[in-house]
Image (spheres, rainbow, N blue to C red):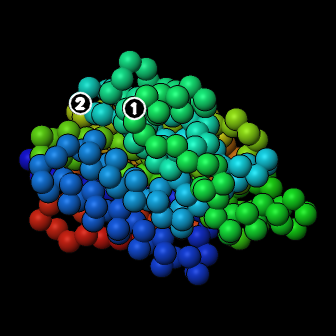
């Protein structure tokens, strides 16, 4: 079976000055995931490896470098879904993990589907994953932005987050990956720090099945990015899969899913990536930019922002 992989690094109004870093980060994640897929390893392994690269890159709002809550802390969410078994692992409100995607992988392979907060971190320890201090996840860029917000010099995200000042000044949004392995299995994965100055405890679309991601090995996999409250209201990832089920090509499915987000929820902004079992790709966004990189076997890698 031909292998394929697609990565996104968030859909928002990425300023010119940050385009290069976003593209470089997506390419690095794709190269890592691709190298894993080429060995014949599973799509689960490839997605976990690729998302870890994005979480470790402070360019992105995931893992280290994530945006801060209104309390000045980092709270992380992530999820993985296996299209062959429909098994699903999600984690939320993590404060002490550098790589939430690896904990989501453990959850997927364990008895639960979704763990949050303190219990999730205890499970991480039981799985042998290292914990860090919350401040180790905070970059000077995000601390500075939070201090400006505290001083009233930057706006909190309103109903339409990607158009607010804070999104121009600071990083925002989820990262995601979908891989198709040699066995023909599709896996979807994502990870986020959420929205800037979110209420502590707030959970967006990212770890919610059918909202931030969905994978059905017979049909395709979709991963969404953008304003989590809006994406959740339209169950956007599951909607994209239903469009594939109705026979739409992946590019059209991604475009319709994004259009639906914008129409159904005033100011609903974001993006969507899709990969099918035939290694066909779709990607669309209604923000100014979305960072991405993808590759199918026998073709050159493609990237952009
Ligand atoms: N899309 C990420 C979030 O809203 O949390």
Q: Position of residue 18 (x, y in %)?
A: 56, 76
Q: Residue at x 12, y 49 (%)?
A: 40
Report which residue position mark 1 lands on.
127
* Circle 2 crowding by C-alpha within 10 Å: few under 14, some 14–19, many from 20: some
Q: In what element is the residue under mark 2?
A: loop
- Inter-mark Cα distance, 2 to 1: 24 Å
Q: Quadrant of residue 77?
A: top right
- Quadrant of residue 75 within the rendered picture: top right
Of marks 2 and 1, which one's residue comes earlier in the chain? 2
What residue is shown at x 70% (from left), y 53% (from top)? 68
Q: As displayed, is residue 153 above or below residue 181?
A: below
Furthest toward the right, the residue is 151
Considering only vertical position in the picture, is 279 above or below 24? above
Of marks 2 and 1, the one in the foreground: 1
The residue wearing badge 2 is 84
Q: Residue at x 25, y 69 (%)?
A: 301
In percent of width and height, residue 39 lies at 12, 54
Q: Determine whether the residue tagged by mark 1 lies in a helix, strand or loop.
A: loop
Q: Relative to residue 283, is residue 118 depicted above or below?
A: above
As drawn, the label of residue 179 is none
Q: Residue 126: x and y, percent?
A: 43, 28
Outermost residue toward the bottom? 17
Q: Is residue 157 visible?
A: yes
């Amino acid at each position: 079976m031909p292998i394929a992989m697609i990565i996104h690094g968030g859909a928002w109004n990425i300023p010119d000055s940050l385009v290069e870093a976003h593209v470089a980060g997506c390419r690095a994640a794709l190269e890592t995931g691709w190298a894993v897929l080429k060995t014949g390893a599973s799509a689960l392994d490839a997605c976990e490896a690729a998302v870890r690269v994005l979480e470790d890159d402070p360019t992105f709002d995931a893992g280290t470098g994530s945006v801060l809550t209104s309390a000045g802390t980092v709270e992380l969410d992530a999820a993985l879904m296996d299209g062959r078994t429909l098994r699903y692992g999600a984690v939320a409100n993590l404060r002490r993990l550098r790589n939430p995607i690896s904990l989501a992988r453990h959850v997927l392979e364990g008895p639960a589907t979704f763990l949050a907060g303190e219990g999730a971190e205890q499970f991480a320890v039981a799985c042998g994953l290292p914990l860090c201090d919350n401040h180790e996840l905070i970059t000077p860029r995000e601390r500075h932005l939070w201090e400006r917000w505290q001083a009233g010099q930057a706006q909190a995200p309103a109903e339409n987050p990607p158009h607010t000042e804070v999104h121009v000044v600071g990083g925002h949004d989820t990262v995601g990956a979908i891989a198709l392995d040699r066995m023909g299995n599709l896996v979807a994965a994502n990870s986020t720090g959420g929205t800037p100055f979110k209420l502590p405890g707030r959970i967006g679309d990212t770890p919610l099945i059918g909202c931030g991601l969905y994978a059905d090995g017979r049909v395709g996999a979709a991963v969404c990015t953008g304003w989590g409250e809006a994406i959740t209201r339209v169950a956007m990832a599951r909607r994209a899969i239903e469009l594939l089920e109705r026979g739409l090509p992946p590019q059209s499915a991604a475009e319709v899913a994004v259009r639906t987000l914008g129409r159904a929820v005033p100011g609903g902004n974001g993006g969507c990536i899709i990969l099918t079992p035939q290694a066909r790709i779709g990607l669309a966004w209604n923000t100014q930019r979305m960072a991405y990189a993808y590759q199918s076997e026998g073709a050159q890698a493609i990237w952009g922002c």
